[in-house]
Image (cartoon, rainbow, N blue to C red):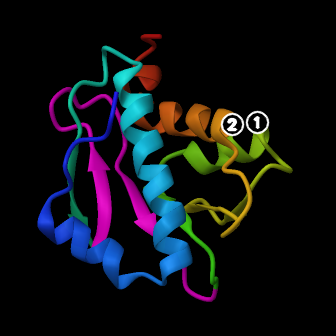
């Protein structure tokens, strides 16, 4: 399934990023929508801005935790940001210790170039999109 058309304000946020970072995060955006579509219990995503960055919410079902796309301070690479009060980044770090670079309990950093590690990344995105379901014990 293709990603839906992008809201104008979200498009502007992507356009404001350095080209190489924006291009990589657009690949992640497509993977977020594809991952959500693979899980019936996630529902339709809300694409909006949070703190001026593209954000993906499971408003329809409440199944997951917000995913934001941007950068972290002091890093010149794309970042996927998660709610720091969740256990998501710790879980990613346990499952994929060498696949990604991490920042505290808040972000997964990606290389600017090269192949996107789709399989491990889609697992991480799935865990985020289903975070509340998994915590309630529903698989």
Whole-Å distance between the Cαs marked 1 and 2?
Answer: 9 Å
Rendered image quadrant of residue 138: top left
- Mark yes or no: residue 85 visible: no
Could you tell me residue 90's position as x and y percent? Answer: 67, 47
Q: In this view, does 62 lie above or below 133?
A: below
Could you tell me residue 33's position as x and y percent? Answer: 36, 37
Reading the image, the residue beneath label 1 is 95
Rendered image quadrant of residue 91: top right
Foreground residue among 77 and 26: 26
- For the point 28% across and 75% down, the residue is 13
Rendered image quadrant of residue 118: top right
Could you tell me residue 12's position as x and y percent? Answer: 23, 76
Q: Earlier in the sequence, mark 1 or mark 2?
A: 1
Left or right of 109 in this view: 25: left
Mark 1 near mark 2, Cβ–Cβ under 8 Å?
A: yes
Q: Does the magenta stretch include residue 59?
A: yes
- For the point 56% across and 76% down, the residue is 20
Q: Is residue 123 above or below residue 110?
A: above
Viewer-nearest of discs 1 and 2: 2
- For the point 23% across and 24% down, the residue is 43
Q: Is residue 136 above or below residue 34?
A: above
- Return the mark for residue 120: 2
User: Which quadrant: the N terminus?
Assistant: top left
What is the magenta range? 52-74
Q: How crowded is mark 1: few (under 14 residues within 10 Å), some or many (20 or more)?
A: few
Could you tell me residue 64's position as x and y percent? Answer: 35, 35
Q: How many labels does the image show?
A: 2
Q: Main secondary structure of the magenta part?
A: loop
Dot 2 falls on a residue whose secondary structure is: helix
């Amino acid at each position: 399934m293709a990603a839906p058309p992008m809201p104008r304000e979200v498009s502007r946020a992507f356009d404001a990023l350095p080209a190489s970072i924006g291009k990589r995060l657009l690949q992640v955006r497509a993977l977020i929508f594809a991952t959500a579509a693979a899980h019936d219990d996630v529902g339709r995503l809300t694409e909006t801005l949070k703190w001026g960055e593209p954000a993906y919410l499971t408003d329809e079902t409440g199944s997951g935790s917000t995913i934001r796309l941007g950068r972290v301070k002091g890093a010149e690479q794309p970042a996927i940001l998660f709610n720091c009060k969740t256990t998501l980044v710790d879980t990613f770090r346990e499952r994929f210790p060498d696949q990604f670079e991490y920042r505290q309990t808040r972000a997964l950093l990606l290389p600017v170039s090269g192949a996107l590690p789709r399989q491990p990344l889609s697992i991480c995105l799935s865990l985020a999109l289903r975070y509340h379901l998994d915590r309630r014990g529903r698989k």
